[in-house]
């Protein structure tokens, strides 16, 4: 509320619309991705600039700077990343160029325009050996190049933008992209029996829930490190129920599932990790 010029002795109060109710100007990197598509829906009421790699490659500092200068956003949502975990192992330079240096490009441009930055990070910054849920204060200990590149980005962004909001999430599933349930659905339609690892643990997270939470965090002006996952407990990969069971039912498929260990696959993950260390985060 603010006071307006009034006769002496009288105060006339008028209501000002709180800033958090106004449409936010948002620039979204990674709009074509699994999470990005859901964010585009969630941000329909805001002034949104939705970008894929064709609009702005994170590695192109001048282009990143240009799109952020043009849109002058209140918030930048950095969902874009090189998410192919296997690919990162064999392309370390590319992983760091996109996931760390690219994120730094965005953070520097955000600092110039005074925009807030929300960075999507991952449970891969941990090694998965902890027997209880990870806290935001736990030390990073990545065991994959993908995890290292994200951990490096987190550290750099906190230096450049102390007010950055880093949201770590895990095991995304949703519409419009590759994810574990979609893979199960595809396999179930072509094979009588499928093998599913059951020695990995994680918290499957629905992209729609996450997108909604991210927008609420923006409106709450969140900063620092936040963990956002759907389930509060760890879910073994072989029992990943929210999508896979539903997907199989809706397909009407009768499929036998055969539990296997990560070591029996070419995934090379870390068994029983809360980080869900399958090599392909999209299942
Ligand atoms: N999926 C998971 O299970 C999971 C778990 C934890 C954390 N995360 C994090 O959550 C975020 C979203 O993941 P997601 O699964 O939605 O990713 P995704 O489906 O793989 O989408 C990646 C997005 O990044 C864009 N991109 C890739 N390289 C780029 C580059 N060099 N410059 C600009 N844009 C580039 C892609 O654009 P194009 O389509 O144009 O290539 C796409 O929009 C990521 O930061 C990821 O690390 C994901």
Image: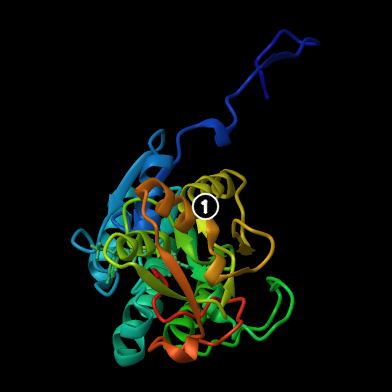
Residue 2 occupies quadrant = top right
Query: Residue lying furthest right in this view?
Result: 9
74 and 79: which one is in front?
79
Residue 282 occupies quadrant = bottom left
Residue occupying the point 59% across, 86% down = 127
Label 1 neighbour load within 10 Å: few <14, some 14-19, many 20+:
many
- Residue 210 position within the rendered picture, expressed as x and y whole percent measured from the top left: 52, 52
Report which residue position mark 1 lands on.
210
- Residue 229 position within the rendered picture, expressed as x and y whole percent measured from the top left: 59, 60
**Does residue 70 appear to the left or right of 244 in the view shown?**
left
**Does residue 182 appear to the left or right of 3 in the view shown?**
left
**Does residue 113 appear to the left or right of 132 in the view shown?**
left
**Does residue 65 appear to the left or right of 115 in the view shown?**
left
> Regarding mark 1 in the picture, which secondary structure is present there?
helix
Is residue 72 among the parts visible in the rendering?
no
Is residue 172 depicted above or below 41 in this figure? below
- Residue 250 position within the rendered picture, expressed as x and y whole percent measured from the top left: 39, 46
Is residue 121 depicted above or below 24 in this figure? below
Residue occupying the point 55% across, 80% down = 125
Pick the quarter of the image with the N terminus: top right
Indicate which quadrant contains ligand 1.
Answer: bottom left
């Amino acid at each position: 509320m603010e006071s307006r010029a009034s006769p002496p002795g009288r105060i006339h109060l008028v209501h000002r619309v709180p800033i958090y109710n106004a449409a936010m100007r948002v620039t979204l990197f990674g709009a074509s991705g699994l999470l990005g598509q859901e964010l585009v829906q969630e941000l329909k009421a805001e002034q949104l600039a939705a970008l894929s790699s064709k609009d702005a490659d994170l590695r192109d500092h001048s282009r990143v700077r240009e799109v952020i200068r043009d849109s002058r956003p209140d918030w930048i949502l950095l969902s874009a990343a090189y998410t192919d975990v296997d690919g990162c192992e064999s392309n370390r330079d590319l992983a760091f160029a996109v996931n760390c240096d690219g994120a730094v490009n965005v953070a520097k441009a955000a600092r110039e325009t005074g925009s807030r930055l929300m960075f999507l990070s991952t449970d891969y910054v941990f090694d998965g050996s902890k027997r209880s849920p990870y806290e935001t204060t736990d030390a990073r200990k990545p065991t994959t190049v993908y995890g290292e590149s994200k951990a490096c980005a987190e550290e750099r962004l906190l230096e450049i933008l102390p007010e950055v909001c880093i949201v770590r999430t895990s095991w995304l599933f949703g519409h419009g992209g590759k994810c574990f349930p979609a893979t199960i659905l595809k396999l179930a339609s072509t094979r009588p029996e499928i093998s599913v690892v059951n020695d990995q643990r994680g918290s499957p997270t629905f992209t729609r829930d996450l997108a909604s939470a991210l927008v609420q965090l923006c409106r709450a002006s969140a900063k620092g490190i936040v963990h956002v996952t759907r389930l509060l407990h760890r879910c073994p990969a072989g029992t990943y129920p929210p999508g896979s069971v539903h997907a199989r039912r809706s397909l009407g498929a009768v499929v036998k599932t055969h539990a296997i260990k990560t070591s029996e696959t070419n995934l090379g993950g870390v068994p029983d990790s809360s980080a869900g260390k399958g090599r392909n985060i999209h299942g």
